[in-house]
């Protein structure tokens, strides 16, 4: 079980990116974290495995307090947390197999890693996982020879090979076209079921979140403003997340913050359209 | 063609010119400056025209004395030629060892602070602005004539070149890939081996081989000031007016340089 | 996670693919490479004793070099320059003049060579001749050509200038030829279709496409020639190098240091001018 309590992050610039965020994740739940750009979604994900150091609060994974670990202990803890990145973050000049096997680096000695001599069961597992994500036969391709969707599958396979207790995904679909995005989300959902581990996904596209997640968490200005099922994510909730509506009511504040422009407008439709889509699809498809 | 009929309100077409007045003026002044600079430089050299006029004859005479090359002499230049290649290889190896830390300091994303960055940049430009033959002059004074001075000359000249290109290579690595390896729980060495090395390896091998190729050419000349290799032999033959032997050496240099260029280009294609 | 088949159906071994024909070839190539490097190090026979002795000599040399002596002395009635200062000054001027003359002459002969070495503009045999000229002039270092020409023409700048001119096609024609090969053929066809002759095709179809690049390359070559001019004097082919060589040979290390600093200043200045102008032109 992943348990986050009063987590906060203030950057060196004084910017408060994450403020008093608490929630628990367990079982094989697929949790989508949504919110406008700059709401602290990435900071939240990265604070969990401490790629970004949180400034206050705690993260506990099965009882271990990750925030207080020494570097060595942290490395051991990171082995149990799989991570999928926005821009795939594959080492492009290595083969697909090396990228996948790098998920085992925390378990094998540096010397074995250097010689690419991984234990037989790891290699077997890697072949099986590649087959599972639909990349059988691509083992010897270099990562930069693959398409975006294929690369993200390698990224997912790498995370799975860690045999993690939880998978974190930081905007896994933002560099992909809508079709591939859906496939990647499906894959992540299926992994949660098959491995019985929770998957925590940062995502821009509200419809995708509704469609695949069991639970949605909304962040605004670093604060948790929504936590519920996709059904509970109604217009009022969306307004609260995307307009940071305060009790006083800033009625004249029309300019909704637009999602970060990452890979073209068709991938990240303007917010109004996102919300329209969200309304028109009652409870996923 | 300009239409000059301006009676009865017929439109007068302006004269067509390629550029407007200022552009033309700037171009004209630039050209004028270049020409006068050349004339000035030529007069400053004080070269007598009859020398220039006799240049083709002189060159032909020189070749007449050289041709045919002294084939029997070929055996004697094998050793100095091997030394030349030696100097290039060992000099490049030495330069790589010394350039690695310099590149680390001279790359924005790895250098510890501004002061170390400045030191890195200073070493890079200092090494690059002194020609290898000048380094050779200095090292011959220190270590005496011979291969050692040559190796050091090549090394010191190459540090800046290798470090500069390597630093650029390091600055271009994809940080998120490095982060991903860190996120799997790999230690610092794992991160280096899986995250950083694969990204800079091809560039590094390319730079090293390319510099080795340049160094073969450099190693042919440092002997002219006594720093070992084929240059020493060339100098001796010229001083002895042994022209056929000189031509043999020149052809041998040509062959060695072309072969190393080919090897270098091939190796760089392989690692890409 | 299991794949579409039971886990034991999958292989347990994976080897990194290699660019070589086989893994065995790879190890042979690596082995040969290491053996070659080791042989080279061994062949150089650098003795530690000599190395340490040299370091001591280096200290002596450095001591002799600092402070540098530019040949300018301050006396009671102001600054006074000596003959040695004028030698540096004259050497620098000659170096600069050599670089300019050599660039103009070198570019003049390189342009036709570049056309010859452009695959898309000339027939095959001409192309091979062009490539051969480029290769040969690239392979021979300026200093080697310089030392040979000094014997032919006597000491002085003319030998140096000719050496630089000889070396220019190896750089200029090579790069220009690459640009010529990249030009847009449709523009050539357009000019040809107006019935223009070969020369007009060059002037109207080719030249406008490569002119800015030519100017940039010329300035770049000047920069290289300036560097080379500072050292050609070491073999007697004119420029500041002769003064430097003499200073080293007569153990005037402080004067040599002054010349070195002057050379570095000139080279850096040339690089700045070259970089600035090239940015403006291209």
Image (cartoon, rainbow, N blue to C red):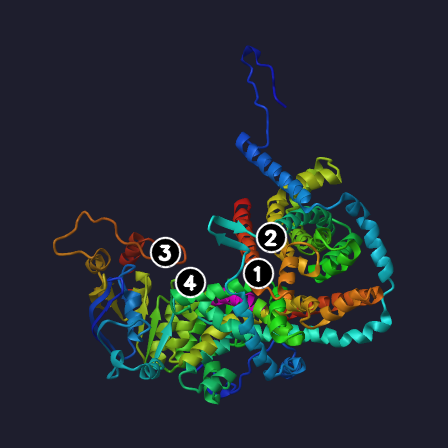
Where are the magenta residues, as a range? B158-170
Which percent across, then down, holds residue C247? 62, 62
Q: Main secondary structure of the magenta part?
A: helix
Mark 2–mark 4 distance (CA, rounded to whole Å): 73 Å
Q: Which mark is residue A261?
A: 3
Question: What residue appears at the point 20 percent right and 49 percent down from the top-left corner?
Answer: A253
Q: Nearer the viewer, residue B204 or C225?
A: C225
In which quadrant of the rendered image does the N terminus of chain C lie? bottom left
Chain containing mark 4: A
Which percent across, then down, holds residue C208? 63, 41
**B170 left or right of A254 in image:** right
Q: Which mark is residue C255?
A: 1
Mark 2–mark 1 distance (CA, rounded to whole Å): 12 Å
Local packing at callout 4 (Cα closer than 10 Å; few below 14, some 14-19, many 20+) is many
Same chain for the residues under marks 3 and 2 in the image: no
Residue under label 2: C83
Chain containing mark 3: A
Q: Nearer the viewer, residue A24 or C210?
A: C210
Q: Which mark is residue C48?
A: none
Residue found at the very far left of the displayed protein: A248
Which percent across, then down, holds residue C165? 71, 52
Magenta-span inclusion, residue B169? yes
Residue under label 4: A176
Helix, strand or loop at label 2? It is helix
Helix, strand or loop at label 3? It is loop
Magenta-span inclusion, residue A255? no
B155 over B190 or under it: above or below = above
Which of pointers 4 and 3 lies earlier in the amino acid sequence?
4
């Amino acid at each position: 079980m992943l348990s986050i309590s009063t987590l906060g992050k203030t950057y060196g610039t004084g910017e408060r990116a994450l403020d008093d965020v608490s929630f628990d994740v367990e079982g094989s739940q697929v949790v989508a974290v949504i919110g406008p750009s700059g709401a602290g979604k990435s900071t939240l994900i990265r604070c969990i495995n401490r790629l970004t150091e949180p400034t206050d609060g705690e993260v506990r994974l099965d009882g271990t307090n990750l925030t207080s670990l020494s570097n060595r202990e942290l490395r051991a803890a990171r082995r149990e947390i799989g991570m999928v990145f926005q821009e795939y973050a594959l080492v492009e000049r290595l083969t697909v197999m090396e990228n996948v096997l790098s998920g085992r680096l925390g378990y094998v000695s540096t010397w074995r890693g250097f010689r690419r001599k991984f234990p037989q069961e790891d290699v077997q597992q890697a072949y099986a996982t590649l087959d599972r994500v639909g990349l059988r036969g691509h083992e010897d391709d270099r990562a930069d020879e693959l398409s975006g969707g294929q690369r993200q599958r390698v990224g997912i396979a790498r995370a799975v090979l860690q045999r993690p207790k939880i998978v974190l995904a930081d905007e896994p679909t933002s560099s992909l076209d809508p079709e591939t995005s859906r496939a990647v989300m499906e894959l992540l959902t299926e992994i949660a079921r098959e491995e019985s581990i929770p998957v925590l996904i940062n995502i821009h596209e509200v419809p995708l979140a509704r469609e695949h997640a069991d639970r949605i968490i909304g962040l605004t200005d670093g604060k948790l403003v929504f936590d519920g099922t996709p059904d509970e994510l109604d217009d009022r909730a969306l307004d609260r997340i995307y307009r940071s509506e305060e009790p006083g009511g800033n009625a004249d504040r029309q300019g909704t913050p637009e999602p970060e422009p990452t890979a073209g407008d068709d991938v990240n439709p303007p917010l109004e359209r996102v919300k329209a889509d969200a309304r028109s699809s009652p409870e996923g498809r | 063609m300009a239409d000059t009929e301006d009676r009865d309100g017929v439109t007068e077409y302006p004269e067509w010119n390629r550029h407007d007045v200022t552009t033309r003026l700037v171009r004209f002044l630039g050209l004028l400056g270049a020409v006068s600079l050349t004339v000035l430089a030529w007069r400053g050299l004080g070269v007598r025209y009859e020398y220039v006029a006799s240049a083709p004859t002189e060159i032909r005479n020189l070749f007449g004395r050289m041709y045919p090359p002294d084939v029997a002499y070929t055996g004697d230049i094998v050793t100095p030629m091997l030394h030349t290649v030696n100097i290039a290889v060992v000099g490049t190896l030495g330069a790589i060892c010394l350039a690695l830390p310099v590149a680390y300091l001279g790359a924005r994303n790895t250098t510890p602070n501004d002061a170390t960055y400045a030191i890195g940049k200073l070493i890079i430009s200092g090494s690059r602005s002194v020609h290898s033959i000048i380094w050779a002059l200095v090292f011959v004074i220190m270590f005496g004539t011979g291969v050692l001075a040559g190796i050091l000359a090549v090394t010191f000249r190459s540090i800046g070149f290798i470090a500069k290109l390597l630093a650029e290579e390091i600055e271009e690595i994809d940080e998120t890939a490095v982060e991903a390896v860190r996120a799997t729980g790999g230690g610092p060495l794992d991160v280096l081996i899986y995250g950083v090395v694969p990204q800079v390896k091809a560039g590094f091998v390319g730079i090293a081989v390319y510099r080795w190729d340049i160094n073969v050419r450099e190693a042919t000349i440092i002997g002219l000031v006594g720093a070992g290799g084929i240059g020493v032999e060339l100098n001796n033959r010229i001083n002895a007016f042994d022209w056929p032997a000189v031509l043999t050496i020149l052809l041998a240099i040509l062959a060695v340089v072309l072969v190393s260029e080919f090897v270098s280009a091939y190796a760089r294609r392989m690692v890409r | 996670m299991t794949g579409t088949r039971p886990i034991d159906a999958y292989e347990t071994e994976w080897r990194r693919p290699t660019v070589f024909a086989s893994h065995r070839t790879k190890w042979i190539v690596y082995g040969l490479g290491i053996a070659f490097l080791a042989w080279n190090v061994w062949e150089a026979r650098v003795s530690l004793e000599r190395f340490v002795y040299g370091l001591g000599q280096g200290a002596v040399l450095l001591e002799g070099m600092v402070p540098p002596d530019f040949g300018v002395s301050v006396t009671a009635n102001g600054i006074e320059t000596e003959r040695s200062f004028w030698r540096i000054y004259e050497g620098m001027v000659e170096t600069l003049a050599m670089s300019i003359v050599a660039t103009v002459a070198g570019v003049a002969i390189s342009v036709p060579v570049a056309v010859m070495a452009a695959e898309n503009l000339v027939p095959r045999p001409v192309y091979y001749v062009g490539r051969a000229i480029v290769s040969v002039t690239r392979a021979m270092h300026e200093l080697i050509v310089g030392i040979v020409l000094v014997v032919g023409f006597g000491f002085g700048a003319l030998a140096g200038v000719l050496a630089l001119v000889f070396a220019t096609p190896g750089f200029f024609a090579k790069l220009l030829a690459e640009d010529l090969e990249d030009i847009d053929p449709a523009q050539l066809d357009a000019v040809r279709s107006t019935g223009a002759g070969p020369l007009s095709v060059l002037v109207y179809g080719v030249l406008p496409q490569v002119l800015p690049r030519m100017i940039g390359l010329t300035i770049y070559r000047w920069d290289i020639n300036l560097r080379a001019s500072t050292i050609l004097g070491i073999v007697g082919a004119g420029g500041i190098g002769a003064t430097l060589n003499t200073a080293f040979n007569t153990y005037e290390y402080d004067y040599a240091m002054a010349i070195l600093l002057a050379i570095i200043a000139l080279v850096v200045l040339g690089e700045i001018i070259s970089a600035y102008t090239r940015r403006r032109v291209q």
